[in-house]
Amino acid sequence: MKQQNTRRVRIIGAGMGSTGLLTEEARTAVTKAQALIGASRILSALRPLNEDCPVLDSYRPEEMADWLESFSWQEAVLAVSGDTGFYSGAAGAREAFLRRGWKVELVPGISSLSWFAAAIGKPWQDMAVLSCHGRQADGAGWIASHRWSFLLMGDLGSLLEQLEEMQLKDLHLWVGENFSGPRERIEEGDAAGLKEIHEKQPFGPLCCVIARNPFPKPEPAVVPVWGMPDEAFLRGKAPMTKSEIRAISMSKLGLRPGAVCYDIGSGTGSVAVEMGLTLKNAGGQVYAVEYKPEALKLTRENAGRFLGDWKGFHVTEGRAPEALRELPAPTHVFLGGSTGELLEIVRVLLEKNPQVRIVANAITPETLSQLTECRDRFAFSRWEMIQAAVTSYHPVGSYLMPRAGNPVYVVVMEGGRSECIDG
């Protein structure tokens, strides 16, 4: 009879890094742990609670799991900053631990959002949240579109400069860092004043911003951003995802605020443009990846026509998967062209984000075969396929005659493993 695996990993939210802010459950988990994992800053704070157990300074899920496999233990703790459910590494680590057959429990903690809001005496239930840390995001556009915003920052100086140029009426900002510690710092004021403060005494890269904008930009008018007419785009000779297939593919992508999207093999840029129109006022980013000169030109021209100078749209010249390696981790990917590298492209995407949602189109049996192989090799938790065949009708004399388009397979893949499964 197979022996039941009794090992348990508890992923705890360590709050702001002070043991005084740990929940009692998290504190008990640390004191009883036979293995402790976390970033060095968190480990140094927790170490006095358990000085004897082995520790690992890491944030890489597979490295953590491999380390835990190397010795005997029953209770382990991974400590993440803030709360386990708020921009932490808990989700990826949980999946890695579950794949090893271990029991995993999450113990929540105090997030930077809840701490900062309490520190300035404001409720946070109406704040629109955006992470700009380690990724390119339109933070200024996000603040302009919401009455209350909370941002995990990357480049504070650039944000303040953009907000100063926008001159949003009665905008008030709070900037904070090092919460709960002796070096906690919170400043408030308008964009120009905080820019001056930041230039004299810079905030660190892990600071946070809360913004109150009494006059947010009105919601944009409803526009047909899914399945726009083909004739709306400059065409040339580059391949183009047709309107009806584009509408189906966009609906399957299910974009959400703050999404980071790739359009791989952008062609005319029609899908990338619709991604941009969907996300322009929602803090997202779009990366159109293409290597053919004419297609690159068309992608840029169509983006300029529909998106203007929106800073969230990026054209990346090169072939996938090589061109993807320096891009930020995606949340959503449209795969329109793979130049025979589909399996490797999918592997790289999963390596960057195991939870990425990929929507791929296929016409040829060869591409469909590769997509089916992806289902088996990468063990997706979600893999679905539909076939769409669109027939349009055109007048011929006094009759309407059908004109059938090629049947297209639309495949959705989500929640896979970057390491291939053989057999």
Image: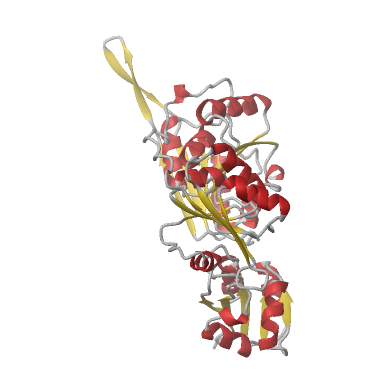
For image coordinates 60% across by 56% down, the residue present is 353
Q: Position of residue 289 (x, y in %)?
A: 63, 38
Image coords of residue 223 (percent x, y): 39, 33
Depth order, front residue of 266/165: 165
Front residue of 73/300: it is 300
Q: Observer-nearest residue: 124 or 421?
A: 124
Quadrant of the rendering where the C terminus is positioned: bottom right
Question: Residue 26 sits in which quadrant?
Answer: bottom right
The residue under the point 45% across, 25% down is 230
By what rule are the colours in the image chosen? secondary structure
Residue 202 location, quadrant: bottom right
Residue pictured at 65% horizontal, 40% vertical: 340
Count of marks overlaid on the render: 0
Residue 255 in sight: yes
Position of 30 relative to 399 (above/below): below
Which quadrant of the view contains residue 60? bottom right
The quadrant the N terminus occupies is bottom right
Residue furthest top as drawn = 397
Residue 30 in the image, given as x and y percentages of width and height: 62, 85
- Answer with left or right where residue 106 lies relative to residue 192: left
77 over 203 or under it: above or below: below
Q: In the image, residue 72 lies at what x, y percent?
A: 69, 87
Q: Is residue 68 visible?
A: no
